[in-house]
Image (tube, helix red, strand yellow):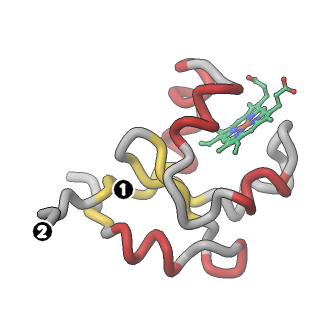
Amino acid sequence: MSKSITAKEVKEHATPEKGLYIIIDGSVYSMAEFADEHPGGSKILKRVGGKDASKQFWKYHNEGVLKKYQPKLKIGELKEEAKL
Ligand code: HEM
């Protein structure tokens, strides 16, 4: 089973030093290792560190990109939390 990660944890890992976590469609990715290799640049990834970047991701990539990199970059699933 995939690790369950809270939105708070994602926020706490917003910088490359802390793992540069981002959310895409409910999955959490650690972009720290990949940021310098990212064809779109590291700057744009740092801007979405700690956040849900689904909208930005789908603007520039297709499903194939996600499938290819998922095994390397995905670290878990965003934990569903009750919205009070
Ligand atoms: C799991 C996360 C991501 C992976 C694996 C990834 C991977 C890639 C790859 C492989 C490319 C080269 C083009 C292609 O093959 O389609 C690319 C381009 C690009 N990416 Fe990402 N990316 C990720 C997240 C993001 C996010 C969150 C943003 C925006 C905030 C972003 C912005 C861009 C941009 C602007 C380009 C250049 C597009 C162009 O020149 O046409 N990427 N990315």
Question: Is residue 11 left or right of 42 when viewed as pictured?
Answer: left
Q: Which amino acid does label 2 sit on?
A: Leu
Question: Is residue 48 left or right of 55 when viewed as pictured?
Answer: right
Residue designated by label 2? 84
Report x, y in % for residue 52: 49, 52
Label 1 crowd (10 A; few <14 / some 14-19 / many >=20): some
CA distance for labels 1 and 2 = 24 Å
> Residue 69's quadrant in the figure?
top right
- Mark carried by residue 76: 1
Q: Which residue is drawn at 16% across and 63% down?
A: 83
Q: Which residue is drawn at 63% across and 37% down?
A: 56
Label 2 crowd (10 A; few <14 / some 14-19 / many >=20): few
Work out whether 61 lies above or below 78: above
Q: Is label 1 in a helix, a strand or a loop?
A: strand
Report x, y in % for residue 15: 68, 75
Q: Is label 2 in a helix, a strand or a loop?
A: loop
Q: Which amino acid does label 1 sit on?
A: Gly
Q: Do the residues labelled 1 and 2 touch (CB within 8 Å)?
A: no
Work out whether 29 lies above or below 84: above
Q: Which residue is drawn at 35% across and 45% down?
A: 26
Q: In which quarter of the image is the C terminus?
A: bottom left
